[in-house]
Amino acid sequence: MMRHTFLYYLFVFLPVPVLYWVAVKNPLLFLLSLAIYGFLYRPIVDANRLIARGVIREEQFFEIFHPQAQVKYFRQLFYFY
């Protein structure tokens, strides 16, 4: 499923309007939501895309939670090839 670039970008950007709405309503809840998005949601989405594209194995799922992993796999995550 995450092999398709459109679906990947949909999953990445879908929470952004929710984050904006939360920021308008409650700044502290926004900080919590932003931390959840950045430290849990995005690494899970990125790891699933990398697994679907065959870049990493399922055993390497938690490797994407390391601080520089998204930089390491930048081309595989964001380009259309």
Image (cartoon, helix red, strand yellow):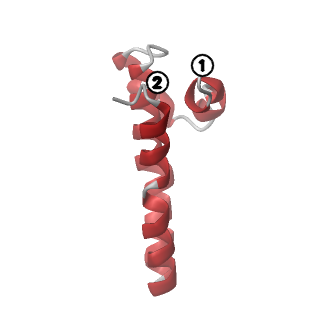
Q: Which of 36/23 is in front?
A: 23
Location of residue 30 in the rendering, given as x and y in whole percent from the top left corner: 48, 73
Label 2 neighbour load within 10 Å: few <14, some 14-19, many 20+? many
Q: Position of residue 62 (x, y in %)?
A: 41, 29
Q: At numbered mark 2, what does the secondary structure look like: helix, strand or loop?
A: helix
Quadrant, the C terminus: top right
State the quadrant of the N terminus: top left
Q: CA distance from mark 2 to mark 1?
A: 13 Å
Q: Which residue is mark 2?
A: 50
Tell me which amino acid carries mark 2: Leu
Q: Name which residue lies at 46% across and 16% down.
A: 56
On screen, residue 9 above or below 4: below
Could you say which disc has been placed on residue 81 in the image?
1
Q: Relative to 60, is 13 above or below?
A: below
Residue at screen point 51% across, 70% down: 31
| Residue at 54%, 34% in the rendered image | 66
Q: Nearer the viewer, mark 2 or mark 1?
A: 1
Q: Secondary structure at mark 1?
A: loop
